[in-house]
Image (cartoon, rainbow, N blue to C red):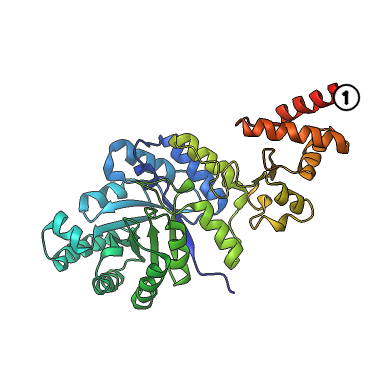
């Protein structure tokens, strides 16, 4: 299968910052953007300049870094938002307006054709001032597809370089987004972007399905942060693209450091079982699993930890078997005979069933206890 024609636009610094309680400093935005650039992300959405003077200065701080990535920012379909974007020296502005009948009725109270015409005038204004434009449909997943086709064709005719489809409330399934995206890609004169939210837990799957249907620019956030349940997770999307379709130009070994940086700056910890970057993403306790993995890690690892600069961990607990204990003890410098393995294993299971974490330090303590009793 040929690698898909895609690029990544990471929106951590804008949509990710819309997570309740999250606010990045200019220095934090610069650090995150630098690491995104090192990974090879093509587009970084640095913020929403119209929000505040400080936000504008933060976006400007990112553009001043001289990164290889193109720098984008968000703007409503208003002239003053585009003016704010112009002051930040970004490469691209994402001009959005709400396109579903539900949003148009409550936000604008005017016919959708009139709202579209007004938004196209702002596209013209941005283009006249030298900005590349991404023309974005908010709540696209609940918008009449015929209207989206009309919008995308008009956007292309007015010089938009890209058009964007936002599943703003995360209501689609992979089959649904594949179906609608295929139609839009075929009808649009310019590449289509996919921006997926995670309200049903399908943002990554929807993003991959959209790419398979022809979407070009895929939107992500680090650790999947974002409003409500968040966005498609950068780390999951990149690893899936590498393993399933051979997109191998991204430096995946930087993902754990990027994840840790965003967790620290956002104040939102990564769960232990978070794919790719979670503490337990490459951890194993089951004795059956570990016995097989000592022969061939492929038995229970589809994603190899080395791919993302991580390491495999064998943890001890109630499911631990003799081979796992023997291996872990030997790695700590404590070779055990068959009798010692059995006695230490019984103590490990006992501790674990009392909800005690059997760390390497605890294991050494148990080994010394058994050896001392011999």
Q: Residue furthest bottom?
A: 186
Instruction: Report whether residue 133 is seen.
Output: no
- Above or below 193: residue 373: above
Which residue: 75% across, 24% down? 365
Left or right of 361 on screen, residue 266: left
Judged from the image, the secondary structure of the residue bearing numbered disc 1 is: loop
Q: Residue 1: horizontal and vertical position, in percent? A: 59, 74
Name of the residue lying farthest toward the top: 372
Work out which quarter of the rendered image holds the C terminus and state it.
Answer: top right
Q: Give the residue at mark 1.
A: 374
For the image shown, how many numbered marks are present on the structure? 1
Q: Nearer the viewer, residue 345 or 41?
A: 345
- Residue sitting at x 25%, y 70%: 151
Viewer-proximal residue, 125 or 45?
A: 45
Q: Is residue 327 above or below residue 190?
A: above
Residue at x-position 60% and y-position 66%? 246
Horizontal side, residue 188 vs residue 263: left or right: left
Q: Pinpoint residue 121: horizontal percent, then vertical percent.
A: 20, 63
In the rendering, at what x and y percent does residue 290 appear? 73, 48
Q: Quadrant of residue 187?
A: bottom left
Q: Report the residue at 69% width, 35% height from top.
A: 349
Q: Could one spot residue 142 in this view of the protein? A: yes
Relative to 136, residue 27 above or below: above
The spot of residue 110 in percent (x, y) is: 11, 61
Q: Residues within 10 Å of mark 1 (few under 14, many from 20)?
A: few
Query: Does 20 sit left or right of 266 as displayed?
Result: left
């Amino acid at each position: 299968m040929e690698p898909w024609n895609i690029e990544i636009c990471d929106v951590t610094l804008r949509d990710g910052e819309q997570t309740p309680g999250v606010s990045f400093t200019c220095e934090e935005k610069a650090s995150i953007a630098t690491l995104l650039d090192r990974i090879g992300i093509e587009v970084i959405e640095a913020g929403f300049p119209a929000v505040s003077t400080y936000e504008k200065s933060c976006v400007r701080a990112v553009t001043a870094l001289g990164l290889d990535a193109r720098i984008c920012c968000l703007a409503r379909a208003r002239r003053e938002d585009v003016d704010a974007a112009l002051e930040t020296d970004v490469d691209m502005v994402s001009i959005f307006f709400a396109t579903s009948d539900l949003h148009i009725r409550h936000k604008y109270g005017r016919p959708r054709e009139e709202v579209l015409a007004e938004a196209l005038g702002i596209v013209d204004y941005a283009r006249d001032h030298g900005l590349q434009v991404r023309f974005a449909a908010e709540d696209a997943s609940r918008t009449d597809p015929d209207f989206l086709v009309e919008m995308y064709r008009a956007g292309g005719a007015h010089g938009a370089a890209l058009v964007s489809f936002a599943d703003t409330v995360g209501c689609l399934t992979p089959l649904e987004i594949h179906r609608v995206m295929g139609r839009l890609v075929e009808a649009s004169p310019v590449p289509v972007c996919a921006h997926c939210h995670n309200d049903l837990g399908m943002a990554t799957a929807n993003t991959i399905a959209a790419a398979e249907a022809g979407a070009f620019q895929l939107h992500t956030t680090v650790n999947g942060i974002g409003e409500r349940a968040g966005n498609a997770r950068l780390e999951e999307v990149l690893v899936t693209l590498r393993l399933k379709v051979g997109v191998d130009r991204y430096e995946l070994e930087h993902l754990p450091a990027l994840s840790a940086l965003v967790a620290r700056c956002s104040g939102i910890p990564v769960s232990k079982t978070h794919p790719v970057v979670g503490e337990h993403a490459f951890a194993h306790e089951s004795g059956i699993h570990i016995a097989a993995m000592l022969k061939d890690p492929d038995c229970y690892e589809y994603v190899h930890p080395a791919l993302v600069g991580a390491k495999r961990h064998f943890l001890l607990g109630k499911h631990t078997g003799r081979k796992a204990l023997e291996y872990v003890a030997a790695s700590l410098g404590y070779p055990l005979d068959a009798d010692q393995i059995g006695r230490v294993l019984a103590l490990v299971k006992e501790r674990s069933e009392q909800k005690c974490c059997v760390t390497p330090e605890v294991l050494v303590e148990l080994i010394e206890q058994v050896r001392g009793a011999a």
